[in-house]
Image (cartoon, helix red, strand yellow):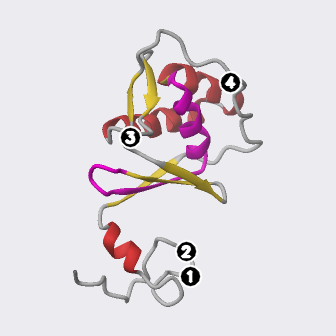
Amino acid sequence: MNDLLVADTTRFPHDTIDGETVIIDATCGHLFLLTGLGPWLWHRMIAGHSIDGLSAEVAARFGAEAEDATRRFLGELVANGMLQPQSSAEPAAGEPAALPDAFVPPAVERYDEIADIIAMDPIHDVDPTKGWPHRQGNVPAADG
């Protein structure tokens, strides 16, 4: 896909904390968590790029498997409405952030029940092996 796309930051406000990007869908209330190379890709898409261009950039540094993972990830962002066609004909100018030294596949986790996540007790309800926002297996979700 060589069309230029841009991250819809109006509908999807975001913040990056400790290398993970948290995004909230302001329309539906879904919460997304981007990990691995995902935050780097998201921040590149804020300026606007094509899937082909970013995938080629990742492939040049990390190889074909990284390119495939990047395409799948960006395709998932498109499917969730997070990337929209860009009105200008060229990517935004500016100094791009450097690629990380090692490739960690980009991933997006989607949480539909944000009310349950917000109500979660971060000390007692969170799975200690996975961290927030993963609920321990034996703790029931709060009833609304």
Q: Regarding mark 2 in the picture, which secondary structure is present there?
A: loop
* Residues rendered magenta in the picture: 25-49
Circle 1 is placed at which residue position? 128
Viewed as shown, does residue 91 lie left or right of 99? Answer: left
Q: In the structure shown, which secondary structural element does the residue marked by tag 4 occupy?
A: helix
Mark 1 residue element: loop
Figure quadrant of residue 77: top left
Residue that numbered label 4 is attached to: 60
The residue under the point 57% across, 78% down is 129
Amino acid type at image mark 1: Pro
- Residue type at mark 3 is Glu
**Disc 1 versus disc 4: nearer the observer:** 1
The image shows residue 15 at horizontal and vertical percentages of 55, 52
Which of the two labelled residues, at mark 3 and mark 1, occupies the earlier sequence position?
Answer: 3
Q: Which residue is mark 3?
A: 76
Local secondary structure at mark 3: helix
C-alpha separation, residue under disc 3 versus residue under disc 1: 28 Å
What residue is rendered at 41% in x and 45% in y? 12
Which residue sits furthest left? 144
How many other residues sit within 10 Å of disc 2, few (<14), some (14-19) or many (≥20)? few
Counting from the top left corner in percent of width and height, residue 20 is at: 59, 55
Going from N to C along the chain, the mark reached first, 3 or 2, is 3
Give the alpha-carbon distance from disc 1 to disc 2, as whole Å: 5 Å
The reply to whether the C-beta atoms of the residues labelled 3 and 1 are less than 8 Å apart is no
Q: Which of the image's four quarters has the C terminus? A: bottom left
The type of residue carrying mark 4 is Ala
Tell me whether circle 1 and circle 2 mark residues in contact (CB < 8 Å): yes
Q: Does the magenta portion include 33?
A: yes
Task: Name the amino acid, label 2.
Answer: Gly
Decide if residue 76 is on the left or right side of residue 122: left
> Which residue was labeled with disc 2?
131
